[in-house]
Image (cartoon, rainbow, N blue to C red):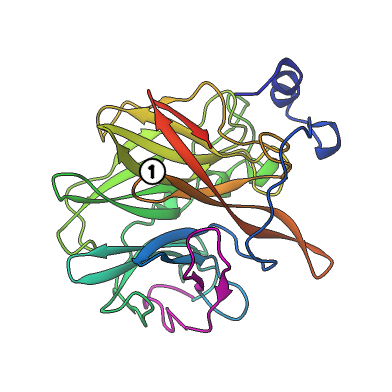
Amino acid sequence: MSLNILSTTLLLAGSITASVLPRAGTELKPLMTVDFPDPAVIGIGNGAWLSFATNGNGKRVQVTKTTSGLGGPWNLLDNDLLPTVGSWSTGHNTWAPNVRRVGSKYVLYYVSEAKDGGKHCVAAAVSDTVLGPYKPDDNPIACHKEKGGAIDISGFTDSDGKNYVVYKIDGNSIGPGGSCGNSNYGSPGSVPTPLMLQEMGSDGTTRVGEPVHILDKGPYDGPLIEAPQIIKKDGLYIVFFSSNCYSTTLYDISYATSTSLRGPYKKAAKPLAVTGNPFDLTAPGGAQATDDGRSLVFHADCQVDGGKKRCLYTKDIKIEGGIVRFV
């Protein structure tokens, strides 16, 4: 998983700090100095893009726009995309939104806290326009409360037109303690954090069949994997994800590939991005690719108003021979 022998040793030890990581990466500047974690992105034509993020700045779903390509400039919008949530939700902790065009509608996938027990569920809301407002479905798509809840949902449409979502079972929320509430893979009491694939109907909101387990944490992933997104490029399915705990410098951007949507998926030999490599960033993660597989948006730690936040970044990528790299 690491980029050199030193980082491999330290990653296995699980006790790395930013000060000892190799900081040989090139500088990459944030697109905005605003707290904007778990970004997703959608193109709306003529070089214009929208990016959506976890609740903040007075909104359940944050949204920012550029009309000049992904490099920006980006401007935070005041639109209230999700003024209400499903009746099952407290309305708190609206995380990691993802917007897809499905037929003539737009579907907003989101995470929120459930009323009964405080675990999270993943759900959908629908709008005629990309900037909403979105009307939430009455019921969530998935909860898995007995396994810790469900978070980090994103949508995917395969080349045959079938719709899917992928999400994480939030096992670390019921873990034995440790980084993000869970012990590392292989440690006593460590709880799984599987990524689940769920087929959806033509409306993008109705479940079809049962979810399928496609990936879980391994020896190099620490206490969890999360933030999944699937794209298809040249016949290859790629699931982007993050491993380790978001609040530590071990957080990363990783990926796995498969020739079949339902797997099995093979993790890449090393992460795409870690603290200090290939960019001079701390805790890069929460990545989402454009549908064409040419660019990635993600967050990394930054300073906003004197405090640590997560800012929006973007970089072009190239996918060739099953390998993803920045260009």
Is residue 68 highlighted in magenta? yes
Q: Is residue 8 above or below residue 101?
A: above
Is residue 67 highlighted in magenta? yes
Q: Quadrant of the N terminus?
A: top right
Q: Is residue 44 above or below residue 144?
A: below
Left or right: residue 312 versus residue 44 is right
Span shown in magenta = 61-90
Q: Residue at x 70, y 19 (%)?
A: 4
**Prevailing secondary structure of the magenta residues:** loop
Q: Closest to the observer: 324 or 19?
A: 324
Left or right: residue 182 versus residue 290 is right
Amino acid at pointer 1: Gly
Residue 57, given in percent of the width and then of the height, sits at 63, 77
Q: Is residue 67 above or below residue 159?
A: below
Read off the residue under disc 1.
293
Q: Residue at x 40, y 46 (%)?
A: 229
Asked where in the image residue 311 lies, by quadrant, the reply is: bottom right
Asked where in the image residue 89 lies, by quadrant, the reply is: bottom left
Residue 297, given in percent of the width and then of the height, sits at 52, 52
